[in-house]
Image (cartoon, rainbow, N blue to C red):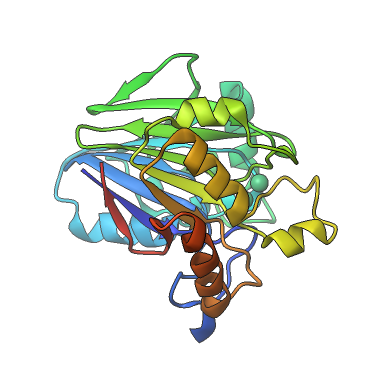
Amino acid sequence: MELEFWGTRGTCPVSGRKTAGCGGNTACASLAVSPEELIIIDAGTGLRNLGRKLKESSRTERLEIHLLLTHFHLDHVWGLPFFEPLYSDRTVVTFYADEEPEETERLLASLMSRRLFPLEFSELRSRRRFKTLPAGRMHLGGVDVSYQPLTHPQGSVAYRLDGRHGSIVFATDTEHPLKGADEALIGFSRGAEHFVCDSTYTPEEYEDGRRGWGHSTWEAGVKLAEAAGVKNLLLSHHNPDHDDRAVGGIVRRARRRFPRTQAAREGLKLRI
Ligand SMILES: [Zn+2]
Ligand SMILES: [Zn+2]
């Protein structure tokens, strides 16, 4: 199975030549577990392109989607109204979040409330279900899915996907303790093949008034990758103010400490 990134930008989408390498869309990744079943992590603006691809390539009668939300900040949900499969009656979507189902539905529906969007959420033709993340592991189409709460304003969660050929941990939108790293997240990420971390700030930017904003640096990502014994580190949730050159510089700094580091970018595929 391959996990594909559709958006790796944090906070706000960007456009233009200078950010085309990583891409300008916000958080979204997908894992096709079969021709008619898909796991999606986050519904940032990258979700729109995924929806277009699914419309072009899908030949099945039914499309089953498990949409795992890390949290409800705009950069993680704003692609939803523009996700074409939501408008099709052959799509069944189950939304998972660390929240009561009614509240998840209310928050997502508010993105399409009148005056903000021409259609209401309730008018979409797809079937939609809302579930609170279970305490233990979920088994979705041959993939074990688990989650871990993170330190972030209004909360967020990390996801771990364990497949047949490896595992991946998504831990964007989190802030680590000033000394050391998040011990619970280290345990959660132990031995993962791929670790996707929050690289919003350089250490210098972080120290310049960004403490308590709920985001991290490549340095915190390296510490965590080393402590958890992960194989590959992927820097993600790129700052909208960091163009490709800046991200390249951040990757080079991180590689001196953790050689198997790369920047997450739109179109990148990882096998799990
Ligand atoms: Zn974010
Ligand atoms: Zn956030």
Q: Residue at x 46, y 59 (%)?
A: 7
What quarter of the picture does the N terminus occupy?
top left
The quarter holding residue 92 reads top left
Query: Residue 36 at x, y = what percent?
Result: 20, 40
Q: Is residue 76 above or below residue 230?
A: below
Q: Is residue 77 visible?
A: no
What quarter of the picture does the C terminus occupy?
top left
Query: Residue 37 at x, y = what percent?
Result: 24, 37
* In the displayed structure image, the side of residue 30 where residue 208 appears, left or right: right
* In the displayed structure image, the side of residue 240 where residue 171 appears, left or right: left
Query: Residue 76 at x, y = what percent?
Result: 56, 49
Q: Is residue 201 above or below residue 156?
A: below
Q: Is residue 235 above or below residue 99?
A: below
The answer to which of 69 and 224 lies nearer the viewer is 224
Q: Residue at x 46, y 47 (%)?
A: 196
The quarter holding residue 168 reads top left
Q: Is residue 216 above or below residue 72?
A: below
Q: Residue at x 33, y 61 (%)?
A: 268
The single residue placed furthest to the front in the displayed view is 256
* In the displayed structure image, the side of residue 125 where residue 248 appears, left or right: right
Q: Is residue 79 visible?
A: yes
The single residue placed furthest to the right in the displayed view is 209
The answer to which of 264 and 103 lies nearer the viewer is 264
Number of marks drawn: 0
Q: Residue at x 37, y 32 (%)?
A: 191
Query: Residue 155 at x, y = what percent?
Result: 68, 33
